Image: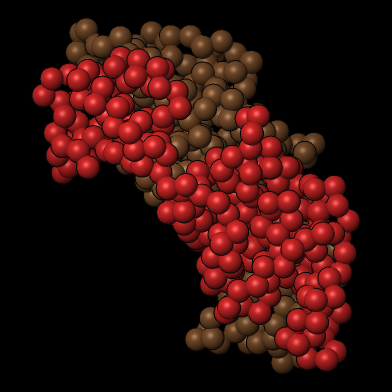
Chain colours: A red, B brown
Amino acid sequence: MPAVRQGAAAVVIGNEVLSAKVEEQNGALLIRRLRERGVPLRWMAVVPDEIDAIVEAVAHARSVARYVFTSGGIGPTHDDVTVRAVALALGRRVVRMPEVEAMVREHYGASPPAEALRLADAPHGARLLRQEGVWFPVLECEGVFIIHGVPQLFRIQLEAALAHVEGQPIQLHSLYLGVGEAEIAQVLDRVALENAEVAIGSYPTFDRSLDYKVKLTVEHAQADTVARVVERLRRELPQGSLLREE
Amino acid sequence: MPAVRQGAAAVVIGNEVLSAKVEEQNGALLIRRLRERGVPLRWMAVVPDEIDAIVEAVAHARSVARYVFTSGGIGPTHDDVTVRAVALALGRRVVRMPEVEAMVREHYGASPPAEALRLADAPHGARLLRQEGVWFPVLECEGVFIIHGVPQLFRIQLEAALAHVEGQPIQLHSLYLGVGEAEIAQVLDRVALENAEVAIGSYPTFDRSLDYKVKLTVEHAQADTVARVVERLRRELPQGSLLREE
């Protein structure tokens, strides 16, 4: 557990995802949008619609990340337990929010089904983040963003949440090599060990239609740090192994 | 934590997935294949290439599921720490397996780079599961299957692992409704509460080109249990709300 919580973590809630009844799209979108915003994703879990599983995942997510995004488990039915779980993970009560209750009444008409009013429940102290296109707001509490799981809604609500997140664009440099991982492992180990703050990735390919065997990535928030490590790799990698860079 | 560990859990390892440098494919494939094999997936995490994060995820996965599948973090480079992490999670030593060492020498030639021999390391007591199409075997230890993360290899190795997993095909019945979730929540809550062993899912749609508003799913290993719950839903759902079934 890092001393200072950084980056983001995600908890995707839903039996429908775990059982492949719907394809998981929200996690993939979140990963891409966080990267574009320069917010490193530290951890992601997919958990069933069970309160204990959600509480545990949200608590863990908060221990490793500054921001937590939940997807799913929002709605009026028996399997919609995310609000209660997030409240438990934060040690807060669940309260009915008059502002959201008014929205529910506007959406469903003057006398909504009693179950629909569950949509107005939130962890005590939660903030409402409104967005165009979805009548129901994102709830935010202590850096936990509670987002609807239906992909069309998730997509819209995620942007409302991201507007409240501080990111830093990441500098990425890629090197494509004509040799296998075993031949570069010693150099990589050494460079990685001496530059622990830089993310160095090594991705072998097994697709013979590609012109390279391994793609290396070097990532850091600062361009000059990336340049320094790339320069060193150019020097120390086996001669002739570097095909191209981008 | 259930008293008897059932089903499967998955740990997808790799900064490349969390940072969207590669699209996450292995988790999606695993979810689909487990469903086809009738093995419920209980939990899935995506974690960085960090030994503590992997140990924690594997330990949690084992606490909720009988089978655990890991994807990624296998290879000769500095970021390949899955074998060590799984060994730690199981409280076992890492040992070099002579059988795998022989495979490495066959693959890389008589004097492989020292780093390549790391591929022959495994948790003490691990079993080798061989498969056609990939020279490197799946390692299995106490129900944890250690699978390569490169999608082309994962796909092949997963089948070798699944051959050692006991499943039970799940019976699924779907009901398509012309009313919203709030109008059925009361019935659903009651039926779900009285049939806790049956998985009842409720999936609203927000796509107006579809002819229904909510899809209900009823799942259980036994067909007559599914039929009984479906019959009850047909009786108790608001009259005229059921559009069709499949």
Q: Split into 4 quadrants, where in the image is the C terminus of chain A?
A: top left
Write the residue at 13% across / 20% down: A239
Residue A213 is left or right of residue B143, and the answer is left
| Foreground pick, B23 / B184 | B23
Which quadrant of the figure has residue A87? bottom right
Q: Residue at x 86, y 69 (%)?
A: A96
The image shows residue A78, relative to residue A232, as above or below, that is below
| B219 relative to B152, above or below | below
Q: State left or right for residue B216 relative to residue B38.
A: right
**Left or right relative to A170: residue B205:** right
Does any portion of residue A74 appear in the rendered image?
no
Residue, x 27% and y 38% (percent of image)? A174
Q: Position of residue A38 (x, y in %)?
A: 46, 48
Name the spot of residue B186 as percent of width and height, x first: 84, 76
Q: How many marks?
A: 0
Q: Position of residue A78 (x, y in %)?
A: 79, 66
